[in-house]
Image (cartoon, rainbow, N blue to C red):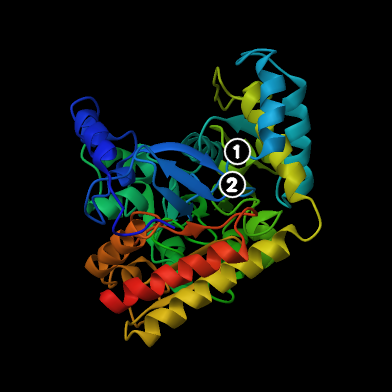
């Protein structure tokens, strides 16, 4: 653990100051800039297992895990060894490879809704492509998304989107034409009546509903009992498609994702993060009759030179092999519950109003005394207090997501000792807030 007396970030500050002259805000993705929590970000030097080391030599227990993919721990030796072997064959083909077949079969075998899959390069690309597919299949233009759910930065999704937009306090994004978002309808998460009303107000016009089955981009918010089942019934009734954006939950809250965990099978699914094993990847898949529309099988065009990249496929295969070992998800569930319940208990003991929970290797908590059902509830949290908590934990060697509106992640590399050290640090910080 880092001692607060020896915690220095001189090199990080120098590098980030220089970065701000080179890149907008000094970062390649907004949440990294620490705008939501204050102070300057730490600059990473290397990662291994459950740990991060910054350029100043500080060591941290990591609960971000490159935003989810590091479910087996950073730089797992099996993944690294496979990548070394794959590197000798080349970094990119732009052509078919056996690795695509192998990972595709693993995804199809694991995820209930997926009968065919198409690999892309990011979650944004997967969601952008699946939206086009929804419209092509139904011949309808409107979609429903939920407030606070983030499906990447494509224009049509930047309507009441969580994550970085929430972190920066931007209601939407300049540069997004009204004509692009006019067909994007929004409803509060966990509100079936609002969804029913939208279908009634837009008869035979809605192509489908897309959502994070467990929200991670407005903080960690699980579905209420019956919510996912209700969406399945409503979409079937109106001959619309149901899409689970499992970029974050896929292979993390269960091997088959949220749809396996909750027993609700959508028509289409988007994936990313874990199936790349730490390398850039995305995917979308679903029923064969829908996927048959995708070029070159059908007329709906989508392409990408780096799609199915052999390095990303290799890392994904090795990661999924590791996740298939017995006891994997029991372990993730146990250590994550220990962490989350410990944090909530310590916060309440120190007199703070908090609410939170976990599912398998995904967790989160809010500085609010109210139950959080949706994004509006999440926004009632004390974000200033979270910022102070985040800084206090950072100074004690614990790296948490730098936003109240982001979920946290554990890995198979986290030990009971790591959790104990984290809770020890949290006890100190909660008492000082």
Q: Secondary structure at mark 1?
A: loop
Can residue 215 be spotted in the picture?
yes
- In the rendered structure, are the residues bearing label 2 and label 1 in contact, judged by CB atoms less than 8 Å apart? yes
Q: CA distance from mark 2 to mark 1?
A: 7 Å
Quadrant in which the C terminus is drawn: bottom left
Q: Residue 265 at what x, y percent from top left? A: 68, 58
Q: Residues within 10 Å of mark 2 (few under 14, many from 20)?
A: many
Q: Is residue 415 above or below residue 241?
A: below
**Residue 88 vs residue 365, the one in the foreground:** 88
Q: Residues within 10 Å of mark 1 (few under 14, many from 20)?
A: some
Q: Mark 2 sits on what residue?
A: 49
Judged left or right of residue 369, residue 364 is right
Q: Mark 1 sits on what residue?
A: 75
**Residue 216 vs residue 326, the one in the foreground:** 326
Q: Residue 65 at what x, y percent from top left? A: 51, 48
Can residue 176 be spotted in the picture?
no
């Amino acid at each position: 653990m880092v001692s607060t007396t020896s915690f220095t970030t001189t090199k990080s500050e120098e590098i980030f100051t220089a970065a701000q002259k080179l890149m907008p805000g000094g970062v390649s993705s907004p949440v990294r800039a620490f705008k939501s929590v204050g102070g300057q970000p730490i600059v990473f030097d290397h990662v291994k297992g459950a740990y991060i080391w910054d350029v100043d030599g500080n060591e941290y227990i990591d609960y971000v895990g490159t935003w989810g993919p590091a479910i087996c721990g950073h730089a797992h030796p099996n993944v690294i060894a496979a990548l070394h072997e794959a590197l000798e064959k080349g970094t990119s083909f732009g052509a078919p490879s056996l690795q695509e077949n192998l990972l595709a079969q693993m995804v199809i075998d694991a995820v209930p809704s997926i009968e065919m899959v198409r690999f892309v390069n990011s979650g944004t690309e997967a969601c952008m492509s699946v939206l086009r597919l929804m419209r092509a299949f139904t011949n309808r233009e409107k979609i429903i998304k939920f407030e606070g759910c983030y499906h990447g930065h494509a224009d049509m999704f930047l309507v009441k989107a969580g994550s970085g937009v929430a972190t920066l306090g931007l209601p939407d994004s300049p540069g997004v034409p009204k004509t692009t978002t006019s067909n994007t309808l929004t409803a509060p998460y966990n509100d079936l009546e609002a969804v029913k009303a939208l279908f009634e107000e837009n008869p035979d016009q809605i192509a489908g509903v897309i959502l994070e089955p467990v929200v991670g981009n407005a903080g960690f918010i699980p579905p209420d009992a019956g919510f996912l089942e209700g969406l399945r019934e409503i979409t079937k009734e109106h001959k619309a498609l149901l899409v689970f954006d499992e970029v974050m939950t896929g292979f993390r809250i269960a091997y088959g994702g949220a749809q396996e965990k909750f027993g609700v099978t959508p028509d289409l699914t988007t994936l990313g993060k874990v199936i790349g094993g730490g390398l850039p990847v995305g995917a979308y898949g679903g029923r064969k009759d829908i996927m048959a529309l995708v070029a070159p099988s059908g007329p709906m065009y989508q392409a990408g030179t780096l799609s199915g990249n052999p390095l990303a496929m290799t890392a994904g295969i090795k990661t999924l092999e590791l996740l298939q070992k017995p006891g994997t998800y029991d372990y993730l569930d146990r250590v994550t519950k220990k962490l989350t319940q410990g944090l909530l208990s310590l916060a309440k003991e120190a007199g703070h109003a908090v609410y939170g929970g976990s599912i398998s290797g995904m967790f989160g908590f809010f500085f609010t005394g109210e139950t959080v059902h949706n994004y509006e509830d999440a926004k009632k949290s004390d974000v200033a207090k979270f910022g102070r908590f985040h800084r206090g934990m950072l100074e004690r060697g614990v790296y948490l997501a730098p936003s109240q509106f982001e979920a946290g992640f554990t890995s198979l590399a986290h030990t009971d000792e790591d959790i104990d050290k984290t809770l020890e640090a949290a006890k100190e910080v909660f008492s000082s807030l």
